[in-house]
Amino acid sequence: MGKPKETMDRPLKETVYTPDSELLSFGRLIRNMGSDLFASRELAWRLLVRNISAQYRQSLLGYAWAFIPPILTTLIWVFLQSQRVFNIADTGMPYPVFVLSGTILWQTFTEALNSPLQMVNENKSMLTKINFPREALVLAGAGQVLFNLLIRVVLLGIIMMWFKLPLHASLLLVPVGILTLVGFGLALGLLLTPLGMLYQDVGRALGFVTQAFFFLTPIIYPVPQANWAELLIKLNPVTPLLQTTRDWLIVGEASLLPAFLLVSSISTILLLIGWLMYRIAMPHLVTRMNA
């Protein structure tokens, strides 16, 4: 018996069995992926609204929790720098703005990275009981990442006005940088999701890995000029994405634009591969959850 061919009847889908697997026709697979992505938009919106409501429900501080982590991180590093615990080279902008913008962009990347696996784990019961486009979970997760970012950008805008930083035409490119950063996180997250559903170690390891890469990304310091340190940090694919987006936002000129374009191209390819792997693996993983 071949792979079931699915047609969307919102929000559920009727399953019709055909003798051919969609994997035998790459063109049909791509068309089905696009069709399911479009059909999942309404369910994704409902999941997004539910998740945002649940995220801040029964919380005294509510939406303030979106501000607290970047504010605390910024205050700690600004205090350490002011006490000369470490020396920071010229960042081209006030150090609080440098750290806050870097922290916000880094949080956006890590939330996108963790989003696919987190959404699948949170909706296991729905996955085993209802047949729906799995892309809805990815879209809802990406929407939640962008919603959290939007709240934090308000804080960053206030800080930028406090320091009277000028506005540049490159601000129009900031959404491109943000979407690329989110896309790269989602690509890696989708690649890891099938493995993460089989082994809980993947989810646990992500926390340690992101903590380590926090210090290998120019979030609290500019890219160093020392040979080995500069090479190591520039080999980090998040570096050109974060640095270029921050430059467009505050400085006006991007110093790592060629690397940004290269990583963006690779990110697009990885996102497509991750989506393919996610789509192919999900039916088997749901069957395993039902067993």
Image (cartoon, rainbow, N blue to C red):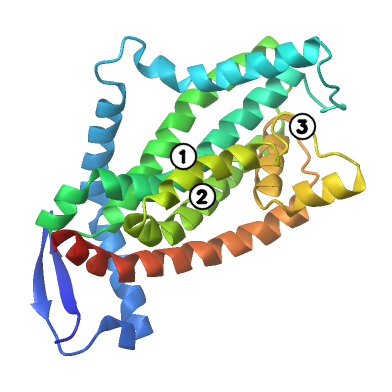
Q: Is residue 7 left or right of residue 253?
A: left
In x, y percent, where is residue 167?
70, 26
* Residue bearing mark 2: 185
Give the label on residue 213, or none. Answer: none
Residue drawn at point x = 42 percent, y = 15 percent: 64
* Residue bearing mark 3: 251
Q: Secondary structure at mark 1?
A: helix
**CA distance for labels 3 and 2:** 24 Å
In x, y percent, where is residue 94?
77, 19
Q: Earlier in the sequence, mark 3 or mark 1?
A: 1
In x, y percent, where is residue 173?
63, 43
Disc 2 residue crowd, few under 14, some 14–19, many 20+, Cα 10 Å: many
Q: Report if the CB atoms under discs 3 and 2 are less than 8 Å apart.
A: no
Residue drawn at point x = 86 percent, y = 22 percent: 87
Q: Quadrant of the C terminus?
A: bottom left
| Up/down of 65 relative to 171, above or below | above
* Residue bearing mark 1: 111
Q: Earlier in the sequence, mark 3 or mark 2?
A: 2
Q: Earlier in the sequence, mark 1 or mark 2?
A: 1
| Up/down of 30 relative to 260, above or below | below
Q: Quadrant of the N terminus?
A: bottom left
User: Label 2 is placed on what type of residue?
Assistant: Gly
In x, y percent, where is residue 213?
64, 42
